[in-house]
Amino acid sequence: MKFMLPMERYFGKFELVHSFYGAMPTGVTVSETGRIFVCFPKWGDDVKFTVAEIAGDQLHPYPNLETNLANPANVAMSFISVQSVVADGRGTLWVLDTAAPNFSEPIKGGAKLVAVDLKTNTIRNVYTFTEKVILPTTYLNDVRFDFRVGKAGYAYITDSSSKGPGAIIVVDLETGNAFRRLSGTPPTSPDPYFLPKVEGKILMNRNKDGSLSPFRLASDGIAISVDGKTLFFCPLTSRHLFSISTEALRDRRIPEKDLLSRVEYWGEKGASDGMITGAKGNVYAGDYENNSIRKIMPNGNMETIAHDPRLLWPDTFSIGPDQYLYVIVNQLHRQARFHYGRDLRVKPYSLLRINIDELPASAF
């Protein structure tokens, strides 16, 4: 007599948006008109262009191929290694360039935040940073915006360093003035007691020579509340969620020791890479250990909205005008650096979407 043993329950209805057979993507964003942009940081794959637009079933370098060719003579105006792209809902694509291929020290003058006009497909503004902001260990990871404060708005960027202090970098978009906040503090740092477990195995740096070291990455996921008053963030190697007042972050009169006391703890949400906020105030976050996506409600309650074996490292999120949550799935944990030099990723990587009946939160 044949019978089936009970199995783990999976749920959440996903649609495949795009399959990637080349370089591994990390970031995705959907504009207010439904245009989809992705990025490919230079982590060892053959990256022909680090920012692209998906049109039909094709990838097109964005805004053009020339901009995607790193130019040592003009690092501020060429994309070097882009980790994140964010459409702001009002006609601009923001490109966050780490300028740190293969997690190297950032190329001097190359780490930047770039504003691209989606109507003309041309670069409008470039924000570069001083050496007090971009440390030799800095890795710019993700960015959120609020255009309701200041004359031109503010940007908040996570430094997800694996070797130095994590931080929230605050940028005044009028002046370009930027500064580090919560730098090296526990909420922006890796959880020293956390051992990530993915596909049933402990995730560690496993080098070709057989040496091992813990996988540690600082502040990574970031989301901003609907009213722009609260910034949510989390280290990559941690299951914890934190928040802080954006007004306090912007106010440099508040010293770091006092700023730390203003951080609020929301509990465990699972280990997340990307996060995003919807118009109803819900924060969506991945759980890469459990192939899941969580919804964190304004009252702090959490709900798992999807649990799917295909969610092999849910990376970046974006909410489109179609009320779908878009997510990059890239098998990050299967990279060669975690498996003694053996690349265990299986193409294609994917861009998936799931209906959440919620529009993106507005930043203006």
Image: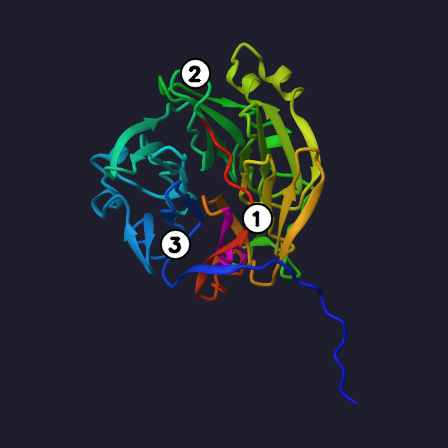
In front of the other: 56 or 125: 56
State which tag comes first along the sequence, 3 or 1. 3
In the rendered image, the vertical position of residue 179 relative to residue 13, given as above or below: above
Residue 204: give x, y in percent of width and height: 59, 53
Let me know if residue 172 is in the magenta part: no
In this rendering, the label closer to the viewer, 3 or 1: 1
User: Secondary structure under badge 2?
Assistant: loop
Residue 262 rendering spot, x and y as whole percentages: 65, 20
Residue 356 marker: 1
Q: Amino acid at mark 2?
A: Gly
Q: Mark 3 sits on what residue?
A: 44
Instruction: Verify CB contact (< 8 Å) between mark 3 and mark 1.
Output: no
Q: Residues within 10 Å of mark 1 (few under 14, many from 20)?
A: some
Which residue is disc 2 drawn over? 150
Q: Which residue sits at x=58%, y=59%?
A: 13
Q: Is residue 293 visible?
A: yes
Taking the image as shown, residue 234 lies to the left or right of residue 38, namely right
Give the quarter of the image for residue 83: top left
In space, the residues marked 1 and 2 are separated at their CA atoms by: 32 Å
Name the residue at 22% across, 34% down.
Answer: 74
Image coords of residue 169 (percent x, y): 48, 26
Q: Is the C terminus in the top left, top right, bottom left or bottom right quadrant?
A: top left
Residue 66 quadrant: top left
